[in-house]
Image: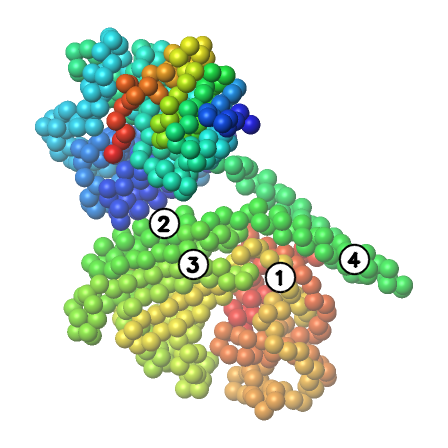
Amino acid sequence: MDELLEQFLIEGPELAQRAGQDLLALERAPNDAALIDSAFRAIHTLKGSVGLFDLAPMGRVLHSAEDVLDAVRKGGLAATGDLIDLLLAVVDRTETWLEDLGRDGGLGADAGLEADRLVARLTDYLGGADDDRATSKAAPDVGWVETLRLRHPGVRGRLTAVRYCPDTQAFFRGDDPLAIVRAVPDLRALEVSTGPADLSANYDPFLCRLAFELLSGANADQVAEALRLVKDQADIVLSNDSATVETAPAAVPFDKTGAASTSLRVDGRQVDALADQADQLVIAKNALLGLPDPDGELARVQAMIDRLTTDLHRGVMRLRMTPLSPVLRRLERQARQLAADLGKSVDIEVRGHAVEADKGVVDGLYEPLLHLVRNALDHGVEAEAERRAAGKGDRATLSIRARVDGDEVEVEVCDDGRGMDPARLREVARARGLGDRIDLDALSDQAALGLIFTPGFSTAASVSAVSGRGVGMDAVREAVTGLGGRIAIDSTPGQGSALTLRLPLTVVMTRVLIVEARGERFGLLLSEVQETLRIRAEEITPVRLGSAIVVRETVLPYVRLGDLVSPGVSTAPDSGLTVLVVEGAEGRVALGVDSVQARLDVVLKPLAGLLATVPGATGTALMGDGKLLLVLDVKALAR
Amino acid sequence: MSVVVDSDRIVIAGVARVEDAEPLANALIASPDMTVDLSDCIDLHGAVLQVLLAFAPKVDGCVGNPSLETWLAPIVSPKFQAKPET
């Protein structure tokens, strides 16, 4: 891929994200000039980069958005909620286009049409803004130029005037604002003032209160060049003797964030390659387990290598940590859109933007979370009339909160809607025929809530366009399990529901138990195995379609792992059996295996390609002997 | 250390850096009537200038100092002083 385009595909989404972030914040603080400036800068930079490629529709939209933001910046246009929504739509569209561009190398067939639509809506706003600007042509904030010139009658001609107010932290950052203004070319007049200060012993000499006004004979571009590092703190204005004043076109505020950043931008693939190598080291380390070690010397060395590889692995994993904020912001925008589409008034609260997790976890979170948000808005949140009848406030609240808890990241999607009724869930489960497999009446209310994660379960009386068809909560559960996490539900009828996802912060070493069934080795997540037992074949009692065993006075369904992974092949029951008690999707299950081998720390790789379709598999791991181990998701398997 | 407090004056010599702002401010807080002597000063940091502007002591040695006269004299001379921003 073209190097320039590659760079653009890294920077573009970041800029779009920042614009989106600023716009969302602007919605809460519509008059925050810093936010308007920041959003403007992001869009401005993005537009500039787009111009380098053949992306005309995107360029048109960004150009119009920039004009609109510029009008807002200059006070000609108010940042109303509608306008911000439109600008957010522009950012959304831009993000989608960037994704398309990265994937297909183009913007897609309907880009021109989409662009025209957005440009038309943006232009509507600009029409109004132009009128406003005409009536207030002499912007009030350039009056200082005239007074400055009056104080320096000896300085004449076409001049560039600057008013520069360094921020209070300038000295701490190592800036000398005085040196900066003295570097302005052809300096004709310089005035310095300092704000009022407490001249007692409390006086802080390192808090910068300086303000500068100056006149230079150089043109605006040269002056802007000298002030490039502090552009956001300086107004640069052209002024003639004839008292006409125009804002210098070059006065695009400087982007502070770029200069202040000390982070290193590394291609994600390089980090992945490094992570892979660290993983392989872990695998090579596991191979040591198989070596004979008569005097225990090897075990000592191994303990040391163990510690080092674990540290290395952790260090590399930390490199992959990315903040959740892009995902949360996309969700927030989607949630607003959905609520609007459904005609429901919902306050959407999102917290935990700073929480960081492994890139793989963060990337994989969006889909399941979006599904939960859709469900909450569509099924959970009631219409206004229903809320009023239930004695609740008209506006519902949907909150999405992320936080770090130990070595896990917890994301909670919470609504104050109608909640879920365990009795009704049991009823639905029975109607869907789930009663054959699960003893519904024996389920506790909490366990009944868990029924929603059972395949094919949907409580909505009608399937709406928003929640859609086909993807149930079981798919959400599977996606979360695939990321090494788990999902839980809590709900009170009439008061709302909370769905909590808990995911590992990093792609952790997963502890698996290696078992053998039908001559093949499989990995089971150790966290899902409760105990290992030896039983005799006579202890297995046939029950209806299956079998059961009694473990400490509890009857557990008995399934042979071999039957699950290769159904239809019947083998004679052996005399002595190893049984694992595992937590299945519908309660505890006794899983029969041929033998239990070792416990192992492995790096679980998500399933790819053909393997992705293997039912009940959650990932693969490479063994020390170079063989691939299929790791099974007991919950999905033991249905 | 380019700020030296004499019996009746505060002498700033050489290049006054950002860290000189504090001793200068302390000296002026202790004795607001002292004269600040810039005769041997070659250049000064914005933070030092800020102290001079805030405490507005009598300043000596600016006029006639080849390094400072052209730009600093108008700034510290009350005649050219801009009104502080409100």
Answer with mark 4 or mark 2, whichever residue precedes in sequence.
4
The residue at 43%/83% (across/down) is: A444
Q: Which mark is residue A330?
A: 2
Circle 2: residue type? Arg
Label 2 vs label 3, nearer the camera? 3
In 3D space, how far apart are the residues under numbered discs 2 and 3 (Cα atoms)?
A: 14 Å
Instruction: Determine the chain carrying the residue at label 4.
Output: A
Circle 1: residue type? Thr
In 3D space, how far apart are the residues under numbered discs 4 and 2 (Cα atoms)?
A: 46 Å
In 3D space, how far apart are the residues under numbered discs 4 and 1 (Cα atoms)?
A: 19 Å
Residue A253 shows up from this direction: no
Give the percent coordinates (x, y) of residue B37: 45, 20
Answer with mark 2 or mark 3, whichever residue precedes in sequence.
2
Residue ID for mark 4: A302
Dot 1 alpha-carbon crowd within 10 angstroms: few under 14, some 14 to 19, many 20 or more:
some
Drawn side of residue A429 relative to residue A551, left or right: left
Instruction: Determine the chain carrying the residue at label 3.
Output: A
* Nearer to me, A637 or A94: A94
Circle 4: residue type? Gln
Instruction: Determine the chain carrying the residue at label 2.
Output: A
Residue ID for mark 3: A402
The residue at 47%/16% (across/down) is: B39
Label 3 vs label 4, nearer the camera? 3
Dot 3 alpha-carbon crowd within 10 angstroms: few under 14, some 14 to 19, many 20 or more:
many
Q: Residue A510 carries which label?
A: 1
Answer with mark 1 or mark 3, whichever residue precedes in sequence.
3
SS class, disc 3: strand
